[in-house]
Each structure stands twice: as structure tokens, then as C-alpha cells.
Amino acid sequence: MTVLTWDGQREAIESKLSEFNLPNLRFEYLGVRYVPFWMPGPGVYPYYFFWQWHAYLRARQLHRLHRFDVAHHVTYAVFRNPSYLYLLGVPFIFGPVGGGETAPRALRVSMSRKAQVFEALRDLANLFARLDPFWHAMLRNCACIVVKTEETRASLPLKYRAGAAISLDNMAQNQPFLAGASRREPPFKLLYAGRLLPWKGLHLAVQAMAKVASAGAFRLTIVGKGEEDRRLKEDVRRMGLQDCVEFIPWVPRSEVLALYAVHDAFLFPSLHDSGGTVVLEAISRGKPVICFDLGGPPLIVDRYCARIVGARGKTEEQAIQGLADAMIELSRMPDLEWDQMRHAAMRRAQFCSSDQVIAHVYGAFRHANSLPAGCANSVVSTEDLAGPLAERPDAR
């Protein structure tokens, strides 16, 4: 296998590769010197466009030498950004990709004007993808399209939807285990970890905390940084929640993982995440989850290990009340049911093992192309990763 990836992650990849014996895995590090690289934000897309063409040209050179059997585009994991590896003339896999998810309009009311404009522009970008001839040409030449959610499948042209497989790209990296004590001691402790962005729904979570403050002892720890940091802290002060909402700046992943052991449940009120790696991390440590029925998180969890709050067709007030009700329910749950929920979370994580996820993607490819199981020489395009050994950012 040959992996084409961004040269900015070469040191991290080589360091990780030194821990393994993988003689059949080769990395090609590519960069675009004449286009500035701005990340994150919209400014990254010009770079991405040229990087994809550069990746195709390099893959074409390598194809003459190694004769690839399969080409697979992994990232960017956004359905509206085309890859050009299909031009190699070998079976081409696109995905898993997301990005077709959208924040319900009714839940944008209390967003800032800037955030509302961003969401509207994102909606337009999803529509304008249909005007991209390269995107349509790629879809026509896909041997297999894999999407992360039903919302992204619905964003594809009608003729491609039935053949698109659904599979999350998140993988449980370690054997699931129960982290922390089984008994809950007041206050009921909720954890959020991730970027502080408007569409992560934390402004709704803070309002839900205001509702439960009089119903018992609750504490929410928010780990991360982002453009919503100042606004969220102002909301906490205005609502008098300083004693029950704590902010922790961005910390190393190892420290975030340690926080699961001292919290009871994980709160993830995102409005359009296509994946939600942190949700998988939470259930891998036996932590029940509270999330909306939007995007990828409700595909990772189920009713046995989570409270999936209905947000479709609801007002902001109804969605906030749903979060509050879920918090109260979990805090008052009998010990036996609570322990069963923790074990259900751990078992659910086992369905997201690397073997399971890989089988979903390549199983769909073999089924679509009537191919037998087995290894093939492949080229993989993964522009924004430190190789497939590192964590992926969420699709936007």
C-alpha cells in the first residue's frame, strides 16, 4: 500500500512508523510550495485543490511503476470536495465522507450573527457542489461511495444514493474498559471535550445547565478552545453558573483521556458533526453519552448507552429542555441501571473496532464490484492526516 499525505506531518508519521514492522506500507509526502497553507478555515481550500491535483500526478507516476489495483480517497472527509485519483483508471473508493449534515434552522436562533452567516454559507456550499463538473465526473467513476451518515447520502445526486454505503470512519484504538468508579457521588459530573465552535451546541448545553441547577447538584467541565470561548464564559457569568461550569484550556490528549475517569457522563450537543471521535472515546471508557439525534453521534451510540435527545423539528427551547431532562434522568438513575448503561457503552464501542470499520468500507467495495476478499496493491490519498495512524478532524 502507498499512502499519499501532506508533507507537514512527515516527522510525526515516521516517528510512529518506527514502532511497527510494516514492510508493505509506503508513504509519499507531498506539499504545494506555490500556494499558502491556512488551516483551519476556508483559506485551506485553495491549497487543498492544488494538493489533490499534485497527489494525482504523483500517483500516476507511481502507478506506472507499481500498477495499483485500487485507489482510495480518505481525506478531506467532506463529500463536496472531489478527489482526482479516479483518473488513474483503477477501481476508486470515495470515503467515508461526511459534511452533508446541517444544523436545523430552528437551533440557529441563539447563535451569533457571524455563526448564522457561516451556517448559511455552508448550506450554499453543499448546494453549489452540484455545479462542480469534477465532482460529478468523480462520482460517475466511483467503484464505491461510502458516506458517514444518512444526511450525507441524501446530499448526493439521486442516482448515486442507493449504491452509497454508510460507515463511520471512527475507530476504537484500544480495548474498551470501564474508567472511574461505578457509583455516582454528587455533583453529577458531565464532560465535554472538543473545539469551542458555534455548531458544537455548547451555548445550548449552558442553557440546559441553568435549567438543572435547581434540580440537584450538577457540574459541567468544558475542555477545549475556540471562537466561542469568550461568549460561553460570558453566558456562564450572566446565568450565575460559575460554580457548576468549569473551563479547561486545550490540553494534551493523554490528559483529556484521564478526565473520563473522574466524570460520570459525556455531553456532546453538536448540531452537525459527521463523526464525533470523542463520543467513541467516551463509550470506550464506559461513559454514557448525551447527544442530539443529529449527524454521526447517534450512529455511534444507542439507547442502551446514551440518551439521544430529539432535535429535528424542535424549537431551541424544546431541545434545551431535552438536554436538561436527559441530565436529570441519568443523575437519578438507579445504581443497577446505571451500571448496566456503563457496560452497554463499553460493549457498543467494540462495534467500532478497526477491524469492524475496515470491514464495512472494503466489504462494501467488494460487494459493489463482486470481488473476492484479499489484499490488493492500493494507493490512498489522505491529505490532512499524520497518516492513518493519527486522529482525524471532524468533517465540516
Image (tube, grey):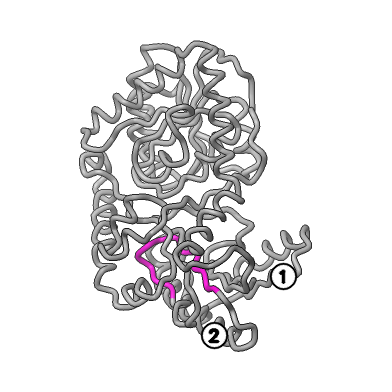
Q: Amino acid at mark 2?
A: Arg
Asked if residue 377 lies left or right of residue 294, the reply is right
Asked if residue 369 lies left or right of residue 174, the reply is left
The label on residue 386 is: none
| Residue 319 placement (x, y as % from top left) | 28, 30
Residue 373, above or below 379? above
Q: Which residues are magenta?
A: 70-83
Residue on which disc 2 sits: 60
**Does residue 246 appear in this view?**
no
| Residue at the spot 36% in from the left edge and 61% down from the top edge | 163
Res 86 → quadrant: bottom left
Q: Amino acid at mark 1?
A: Asn
Residue placed most toward the observer, 141 or 217: 141
Residue 336, above or below 8? above
Assign a secondary structure to mark 2.
helix
Residue placed most toward the observer, 214 or 269: 269
| Residue at the spot 27% in from the left edge and 65% down from the top edge | 159
Q: Residues within 10 Å of mark 1 (few under 14, many from 20)?
A: few
Assign a secondary structure to mark 1.
loop
| Residue 127 placement (x, y as % from top left) | 24, 63
Residue on which disc 1 sits: 24
Magenta span contains residue 388: no
